[in-house]
Amino acid sequence: MGLGGISIWQLLIILVIIVMLFGTKKLRNLGSDLGGALKGFKTAMKEDGPVDGDDDDESVKKVGGSTMKSEKASDKE
């Protein structure tokens, strides 16, 4: 028994059909593209690091070329 009641022979038949449909070159390119994307994602996550909460007193947003500052509820009172 394999995954969820699928035997190894059924998985091999599915793999052969996929290779026949797409070809090995397209599958190899797809695998390398997926691997590159995952590697880029991992490096981006390492570079970001934890988010600092230093500027909690006011948030600055750019909307349509103009800068807007949002206020906390305690500042409005």
Image (cartoon, rainbow, N blue to C red):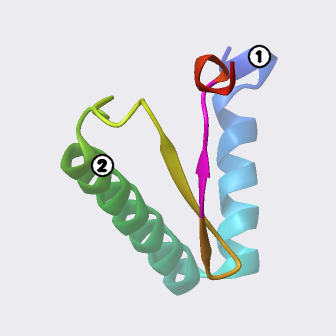
Q: Nearer the viewer, residue 26 or 8?
A: 26
Instruction: Say which mark, if any, is on residue 42.
Output: 2
Give the number of the mark in front: 2 or 1: 2
Q: Residue, x 65% and y 20% (percent of image)?
A: 2
Give, as a three-letter code, the residue at label 2. Answer: Lys
Q: Residue, x 53% and y 79% (percent of image)?
A: 24
Q: As displayed, is residue 23 above or below residue 75?
A: below
Res 52 → quadrant: top left
Q: Position of residue 14 (x, y in %)?
A: 75, 51
Q: Nearer the viewer, residue 25 or 17?
A: 25
Q: Residues within 10 Å of mark 2 (few under 14, many from 20)?
A: few
Q: How many tags in the picture?
A: 2
Q: As displayed, is residue 67 above or below residue 4?
A: below
19 left or right of 54? right
Secondary structure type for disc 2: helix
Q: Position of residue 35 (x, y in %)?
A: 38, 61
Q: As displayed, is residue 51 above or below residue 73?
A: below
Q: Looking at the figure, which quarter contains the N terminus?
A: top right
Q: Position of residue 56 (x, y in %)?
A: 41, 30
Q: Position of residue 23 (x, y in %)?
A: 62, 82
Magenta residues, start to end: 68-72
User: Which residue position holds label 1?
Assistant: 4
Q: Nearer the viewer, residue 56 or 36?
A: 56
Asked if the residue under mark 1 is in contact with the one under mark 2, i.e. CB atoms within 8 Å, the reply is no
